[in-house]
Amino acid sequence: MNNHRALIVEDERDMAAEIGDLLGSMGYDHVAIDNLADGRRLLDEGEFCFVLLDLQIKAEKFSIRPRVEAGMTFLRELRQKHPRRGENDMHLLPVIVVSGHAKEHEDIVRAFQAGANDFVRKPLGQFGQDLSAKIEACLDRSGRHSHAACCTNSDDLEATCPVTNITHSPDYREVWFRGDLFMFGELQAKVIRHLHEAWKSGSPWVAGKAILRRVGSDDVAAKLANLFRRHPAWQRLLLSNGRGLYRLADA
């Protein structure tokens, strides 16, 4: 396979065909499906360079009606399987949401929180949008302008893509873990960044007092628990051994 390969997840047959024609004109291959169950299967079986996702899809092939929650579930599960980012913090597997659902603003916010990289409204070609330009921009930012740069197998993936157990914003104020979004203040975000770097280094347990010194905390008690104990991430994303050491949970 010498061309980029896209996964189209689209419930409307005519729209899927329109997107497929656009990708063909760009020289890209694609696979189109219309439901969550097939999307899950292809994520396990296929290798794709980017995903075009309609949020309102069916849960199963023969479901009666499409639902936004099915698309959101697919997006969250995709990000759990493919959380990796490049050096500029762009996901290595870009996802562009293509949707015209009525609750547009709310859905856009939820999609970005779940790990979408861009958003295009239906119908295509209106609102000053250019889907092909958005695709190229996402591929460029992910380091995949050329298909040769794509991670095409598990060995290459480990060699060229940094391994991570969470998805996060550049400043770590927003962190997605096991489908949940955690929001952090500035000091908390710095702590999470340090713990994440320790996790990736292979030595995940770090002394809380040492981290607090690094991030500039003025807590005289020097206890990391004082900073996080009331936070929903405590004992879910952030773990303590009860003896002053802390780490991030494994995925």
Image (spheres, rainbow, N blue to C red):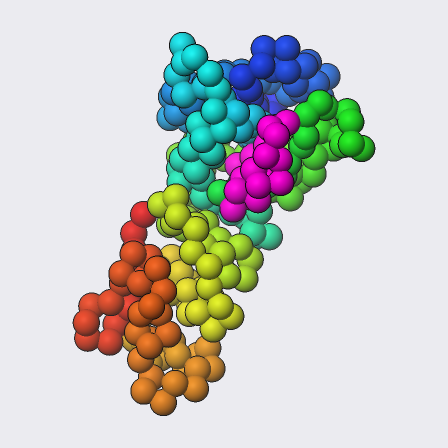
The single residue placed furthest to the front in the displayed view is: 102
Front residue of this view, candidates 15 and 215: 15
Residue 108 located within the stretch drawn in magenta: yes
Is 167 left, or right, of 101 in this rendering?
left
Q: Quadrant of the N terminus?
A: top right
x, y percent for residue 211: 38, 76
x, y percent for residue 94: 56, 37
x, y percent for residue 248: 32, 60
The residue that appears at 32% across and 87% down in the rendered structure is: 221
Q: In this view, does 170 lie above or below 95?
A: below
Residue 176 visible in the displayed image: yes
Is 76 left, or right, of 3 in this rendering?
left
Q: Give the range drawn in magenta.
A: 93-113
Q: Is residue 119 above or below residue 236?
A: above
x, y percent for residue 134: 70, 35
Is 130 left, or right, of 8 in this rendering?
right
The single residue placed furthest to the bottom in the displayed view is: 220
Q: How many marks?
A: 0
Residue 94 visible in the displayed image: no
The residue that appears at 63% across and 27% down in the rendered structure is: 100
Residue 194 located within the stretch drawn in magenta: no
| Quadrant in which residue 247 is drawn | bottom left
Q: Is residue 16 above or below residue 215?
A: above
